[in-house]
Image (spheres, rainbow, N blue to C red):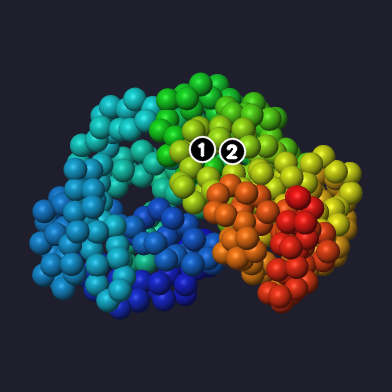
Amino acid sequence: MNGDHAGEIARFLAQPVLARLLLALDGNGQETRVVGGAVRNLLLGEPASDIDLATTALPDETIRRGRAAGFKAVPTGIEHGTVTLVADGASFEVTTLRRDVETDGRRAKVVFGRDFVADALRRDFTINALGLGHDGKLHDYSGGLDDLAQRRVRFIGDAAARIREDYLRILRFFRFHARYGAGEPDAQGLRACIAGREGLAGLSRERVRAELLKLLVAPGVIATIRAMAGAGLLMPVIGGVPYLSRFAAIAGDDGAGVYPAFRLAALAVAVGEDALRLRERLRLSNEEFDRIERLARAQEGLGGRAHLPDLAALRHVAHGAGDDAAAAALVLLNATAGSENWDEVQRLIGELGRTPRFEPTGKDVVGLGIPPGPRVGQVLEAARQSWIEAGCPAGADEQVEFIKAALAAAR
């Protein structure tokens, strides 16, 4: 594979800022290599934008050499041997070679070393353990090149042992298979994930959330999620029954530009209680929870319909949950029903987006003789509902007539 990619490797290493950094860190008794995802992506012909390096130099020496070459040094993880070097708008994580001396399923205690083999073999998957020297030589100590060619995601060494070192690797196994694998997940790895699934409960919810959201936008997520469900590994993560058919109906693209929380909602949310459960279980951000909770409300507003709603019903839902939530709920309703009526879905969403604003406010109600108080909001809401039923005519004067009608009906 090295010869097949000689041109790409040469161009990659010739990037001025990377070449400058390797020149600074290499030599005088030290060696530095590009490692991990950048090498993997380079060999796959994909962007290798996040460049990590492994070095025999200790962190203080990395900082000294980096600064001497004009890089800003940031000790982002210096207790673990990681220094971030920044120059010309590019940043590189440089980590001293390490080996594990103690693991507890969540984190490892490491000591620094000078052995590239030991450093590579402590990683999770063979395709993530490749190294690239400044001379263009590829280093593979675990069969990663062959696995990469076969689109196979395989744990390094004994899969169960790798998982016991960090149970998050269960989710990473499925995430990397969805992103880089082909066919069925590696059988040994799958068995080890099933055997180690109880370890998921001890992971931080933030780490689980981050891995799950990345998985949900990976190109091969549909088959991978089904494999997780079949292995009994999905419900322990989301804490409820997944909506696999609905998810498959909306996750057919490669995930580019998709908001991950929408896919999470498609997989696991039908009512407000589901949103609350996920917030607690995955420590959702405020923005993620807001979107998912409003989407849940919109789904409840559309109810268990067998057919798509009319425009007025959709507008009523949008008034309570927001246009974006109503549109997303409509997409999920269509997917749940197994409908292929995507043209009508797009038409309704387009009409929803062109709905005029309801201009009147509480001041207009007060101006018609209603004293400030709860009744003002009640009249305004009744007027808005009637306005929606009437097709949402534009124009403030015409809309005020709905307030007058609501007042008359209340007398």
Between residue 230 and residue 97, name the one nearer to us: 230
| The image quarter in which residue 322 lies | bottom right
| The image quarter in which residue 328 lies | bottom right
Q: Secondary structure at mark 2?
A: helix
- What's the mark number on residue 279? 1
The answer to whether marks 1 and 2 mark residues whose Cβ atoms lie closer than 8 Å is: yes
Left or right, 142 with reference to 122: right
Seen at 75% across and 68% down, the residue is 401
Q: Does 176 sit above or below residue 45?
A: above
Rate crowding at label 2 as few (under 14), some (14 to 19) or many (20 or more) other CA atoms within 10 Å. many
Seen at 53% across and 24% down, the residue is 197
Q: Does 249 sit above or below residue 173?
A: below
Mark 2: amino acid: Ala
Left or right, 401 with reference to 60: right
Seen at 78% across and 60% down, the residue is 405
Mark 1: amino acid: Arg
The image shows residue 244 at horizontal and vertical percentages of 73, 39
Instruction: Name the residue tied to disc 2.
Output: 275
The image shows residue 275 at horizontal and vertical percentages of 59, 38
Seen at 24% across and 67% down, the residue is 86
Left or right, 44 with reference to 272: left
Rate crowding at label 1 as few (under 14), some (14 to 19) or many (20 or more) other CA atoms within 10 Å. many
Left or right, 89 with reference to 61: right
Q: Does 388 sit above or below residue 213?
A: below
